[in-house]
Amino acid sequence: MLQFKLVLLGDSSVGKSSIVHRFVKDSFDEFRESTIGAAFLSQTIKLEKQDDVTIKFEIWDTAGQERYKSLAPMYYRNANAALIVYDITQPDSLAKAQSWVDELKNKVGDQDLVICLVGNKLDLCEEDPQKRVVDTEDAQRYASEQGLLFQEVSAKTGAGVTDIFQTIGEKLYVQKKNSQQAASQTRNTVNVELQRPSTNDSTSCCS
Amino acid sequence: MSRSASLLNSYGMHVRPMHSGHGVSLPKKSPSVPDLNRTYLGENKSNVSMMSEPKPPNSKPSLVESNSVEDATDLSFIELYEEAEEDENGSGSTTPMTDPIPAAVSYSSELEQTTNSILKDLSHFDRYGFKKQSTYITENEYNSWWSEYSQYCIRRKRKWQDLLEKSGLSTNNDSPDRFPPKSEKLKRYVRKGIPAEWRGNAWWYFARGQEKLNKNKGLYDKILNNLNSSQNGQLRDSDVIERDLNRTFPDNIHFQRKSDDTEEPLMIQSLRRVLIAFSIYNPKIGYCQSMNFLVGLLLLFLDEEKAFWMLVIITSRYLPGVHNVNLEGVNIDQGVLMLCIKEYLPEFWHRIMPKQQARNNEFLYKLPPLTLCTASWFMSCFVGVVPIETTLRIWDCLFYEESHVLFKISLSIIKLSEQELSRHNHHNTRSRPPNKDDDDIEIFQIIQTFPKKLLNPNDIFDRVIFKRRISFNNLNQEEIDRCRKYVTSQRLKHKNYTELVGDKAASSSNRDSKMASDLINDALSSEVYGFKKSLTGVHWNNSIKEKVRQIRRR
């Protein structure tokens, strides 16, 4: 089974832990204790778009307050994916999310790191559209400029939550498969060259 | 509770007006201590009976406010509690709590109904108002443990009563405010648990809270009143505090709002004031997530002003720097914990530490991932890490013995969870070869969940803390203070080195930066920390001793 490390980052009380709990336990609490330091959870899913592929997420849920940022490198060391969460009813939280995107891009050299921007608390805006302060289009535009996945969700109703993990899982799986194929191709090429003299190479053929 | 005595300031906070002495208009000052005798009665009417004057159970609780703190009774709360439980289990008897609830709400039959349903539900909560059941502990497990442990509490309380009597101290209507001088005997008593009803006073006494308060008389009130007058100054931390208020003990009845339209629980109001006042009092720390839990727990045992000063004492004396803006104090303590693990739990150490890192001191400034989990143990002093009764026993020792207790408890938890770890390990090696990543995940998972199952405090205290042959029990405050100094200086040196060398190295090739970091590690690793091997008969290395002396001199 493939395993991927995923970290959650974002301002305090945007709903990081609630998203994880919806995903892992399919439950929701209106008031969830603030996360101190980090919490670790894992969840296995079956990829919908692939036949018979299951992957396991190791999820590191983190404290959101600014000062915990100094501990962050420990979380995202060797991460394969990051969920950067903001609250669509809190304008500051998108700015915080953007600074997380910058930090990850600067500090994690890995080109394959999958980053997903997640706007949470969709349910609040469905009750009262006035509550929305971050437009879907704006966030979407920012995400595509930065090459991020993007999804609005509600940890409360569950809307969109499994989708994020499906999309991320899919992307990670395809990446992994491609890189494995690439690796085995180089290996094969090398072998081929070693085994056979170049005259037998199809490109230099004597047709 | 009348709110007329309070003012609404610019933060929507109810602030007490300046006030001298006692009286009815001091609703916010002292009454946050839930009367343990009434935990099961006081929940209705949003803390009213909790806050009200202590009364014999038969009298009609009035709504007159008072700032009295503790009820003066014997251990009846435990017996009441157990009877209540039998009742819940269908013994058929009427409630043993002799009807104070219907009396309190007799003005409304509708309320009476609500109250009855609350009464029924109360059996789901412990004597502090916390939900008995958690993800890791069922209510049945809780109840069967409590039926034994409550007897233990009764026995211990009798011992305490004797001790006070022999020392010529009064139990002061079950609320003693003076305790015997420190001694081995008293330490043992504290380690076996301070009676719950005396806890607030005992913590306050052992932490020398009154000394602090006397030096700063009236300051707490002054901070809150200034806040009231400086209308427009938006506080740096008020947003973050606000977001955490309802995320502090949401499972505790004293912190719960009944419904959206009822008034905010008094406990939440007190919590807000203490946290805001602290962020003004100590801007270097401000508000740090985890302080909400510290204050939350303090407020269950002490009045607001005392809780405030206890927070001041915890963040300066017991956990210096831990909550600072850069969290350096917590990193230092994690470094100290790693040193302790290396010294006292070598097997576990080898599991968490790759060999090349274990040789030098790199782990002190590049902390291993395990510390992501253990950091919270220190920041919240185990609140939320272990079940509540175990937390309280740890706090008893913390205020009596100071912070080295937190390290001992951490080592104990790791030691106890090692059994579980090795069980998993055996299971794993059979199915596939061990893989460092998988192992890390497993360790993290067990270290995270194991403490949450430590329902019985004596599992730690009797099995580990009281065992002399367990080597880390030699740890004392002096040792931890020396460790802290050592780790602080190592981390600082590393920071200075990397600032000097690191910038250059970063701009050149990877190989250079690798060399630079090796150089730094070598330079710093020449100073090794040596634990004091008292009583164990191990040869005490003189050169290390000398080095430690040097460090201490610096």
Image (cartoon, coloured by chain):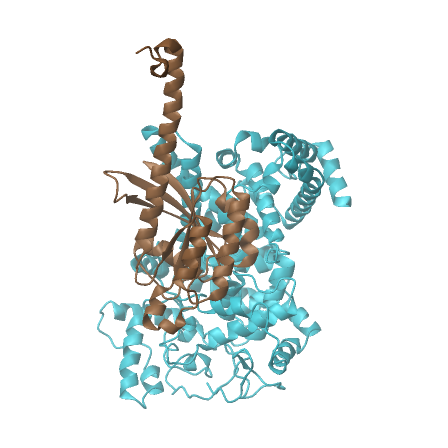
Residue at (39% x, 32% y) in the render: A179
Relative to B106, is B314 on the left or the right? right
In the rendered image, which quarter is residue B152 located in? bottom left
Residue situated in front as seen by the camera: B303 or A145: A145
> Which quarter of the rendered picture does the C terminus of chain B lie within?
top right
Residue situated in front as seen by the camera: A89 or B336: A89
Task: Say which chain is cyan.
Answer: B
Residue situated in front as seen by the camera: A179 or A53: A179
Relative to A187, is B466 on the left or the right? right
Is B366 situated above or below A92? above
Residue at (62% x, 85% y) in the render: B18
Q: How many marks?
A: 0
Relative to B553, is B535 on the left or the right? left
Q: For the view shown, which residue lies furthest in the front direction? A: A207
Residue at (21% x, 73% y) in the render: B92
- The colour with which the image depicts chain A is brown
